[in-house]
Image (tube, grey):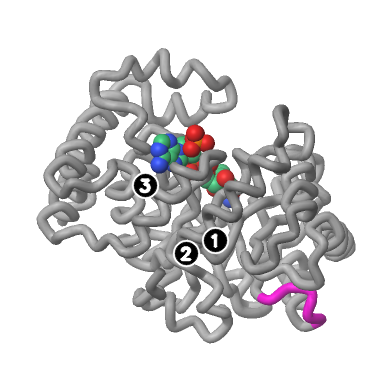
Amino acid sequence: MSMPSSPAGESRHIDLPLLSRVGLGAYPLGGPDAGGDAETRARACLHAAHDAGYRWIDTGEVYHDTGNETLLGRIDLRVLAVATKVAPAPAGSGLRPAQIRAACRASLKRLRRDVIDWYYLHWPDGSHVPLVESWGAMRSLVDEGLVRSAGLSNFGIDQMQQCRTVGPIDVVQLGLSLVDHHDSREVARWCGHHAIAVTVYEPLANGLLSGAVTPSTDLRAWAARDVAAWPFFQRVLTGDSLTRTLTILNVVHEWSKQLGTPVAQVALAWALAQPGVVSVLPGSRRPDHIRCNGGAADLRLPPEALAALDQVTGFAK
Ligand SMILES: NC(=O)c1ccc[n+]([C@@H]2O[C@H](COP(=O)([O-])OP(=O)(O)OC[C@H]3O[C@@H](n4cnc5c(N)ncnc54)[C@H](OP(=O)(O)O)[C@@H]3O)[C@@H](O)[C@H]2O)c1
């Protein structure tokens, strides 16, 4: 798998050889009680990912109520680097410095590791914990060697500027896909200018851009399968946004046909081509899908395809 060439790839703070262009979103693997033989299935997925050139996995303390970290720890495949996150209370441990330090040690224990490769604040704290204090705690974890790189997920540029008064930001995780989270594109560009690596979650828009959904699929019925997808449904599949989503879906499928490349790879390669983006982390619990998605690492979309996709998403200048 080739290494990133974007400006963010020049970051002094990132151990770049670990950050392959495609990482595995581990959330769909669930926890140890995920049903069936969760551990065997997850083990097969992690091995498929490694064989396909993935070099890192993404989890979080809140994923399946810490169970996702526990499951990954049981598999203990250390050739894959790991990203995890501490979340604000009450969903997570909380972002006060003492809470962050305790959360980091608890994640290390569950993951059975001595160091977390990328440790993120999962989302901004809506309470009164000053962000600069949280960020100071994150930087101390790096200084103490418990964390290799410290990052922010779902934060805006103003908040990142506050953090940078305390210490560098190594990595940022944002939602972005052809159909959703379009505001992230400017944030990613800003990060690229500041040598901060950007990794992208939900690059397949919860499976909408995976190829499993076609322009003739009943999208409302498809979305209804998962109540948790409701905010996504509101953003992407109602009113005017539904028309736009369908148009985008059509264009992606056309380019997939024209290039003879799976739809999922076209969607992932588009995300990888966005300014500042270094890596994408599609989630999957199926080895065949994981192998397919890994193929996006080496796919460079032709300029005409990128132009057509920028046109249909509204990003064309
Ligand atoms: N930082 C944050 O706030 C945040 C938020 C959300 C997610 N995340 C991270 O990002 C990761 C990815 O997000 P996500 O999993 O929600 O969304 P996603 O990657 O956009 O989509 C995952 C869905 O696509 C399907 N899929 C994946 N590859 C496929 C393929 N080649 N063909 C057909 N279907 C395919 C998966 O089903 P199968 O299992 O059947 O393949 C799954 O239903 C998560 O696992 C998590 O680690 C982070």
Mark 2 neighbour class, 10 Å CA radius: few under 14, some 14 to 19, many 20 or more: many
> Which residue carries the number 2 mark?
53
Residues at marks 2 and 3 touching, judged by CB atoms closer than 8 Å:
no
The image shows residue 262 at horizontal and vertical percentages of: 28, 44
Quadrant in the picture for the C terminus: bottom left
Residue type at mark 1 is His
Which mark lies nearer to you, 1 or 3? Answer: 1
Disc number for residue 182: 3
Left or right: 92, with 15 as reference point: right
Residue type at mark 3 is His
Residue 127 shows in this picture? no
Q: Is mark 2 on a helix, strand or loop?
A: loop
Residue type at mark 2 is Gly
The image shows residue 138 at horizontal and vertical percentages of: 74, 70
Residues at marks 1 and 2 touching, judged by CB atoms closer than 8 Å:
yes
Left or right: 151, with 249 as reference point: right
Identify whether 143 is placed above or below 274.
below
Left or right: 137, with 249 as reference point: right
Q: Tell me which segment is drawn in magenta.
A: 144-148
Distance in Å between CA atoms under marks 2 and 3:
28 Å
Cβ of mark 1 under 8 Å from ligand 1: the answer is: no
Q: Is mark 3 on a helix, strand or loop?
A: loop
Identify whether 198 is placed above or below 92.
below
The image shows residue 24 at horizontal and vertical percentages of: 54, 53
Q: In which quarter of the image is residue 118?
A: bottom right
Mark 1 neighbour class, 10 Å CA radius: few under 14, some 14 to 19, many 20 or more: many
Quadrant in the picture for the N terminus: bottom left
Which mark lies nearer to you, 2 or 3? Answer: 2
Residues at marks 1 and 3 touching, judged by CB atoms closer than 8 Å:
no
Mark 3 neighbour class, 10 Å CA radius: few under 14, some 14 to 19, many 20 or more: some
> Which residue carries the number 1 mark?
50
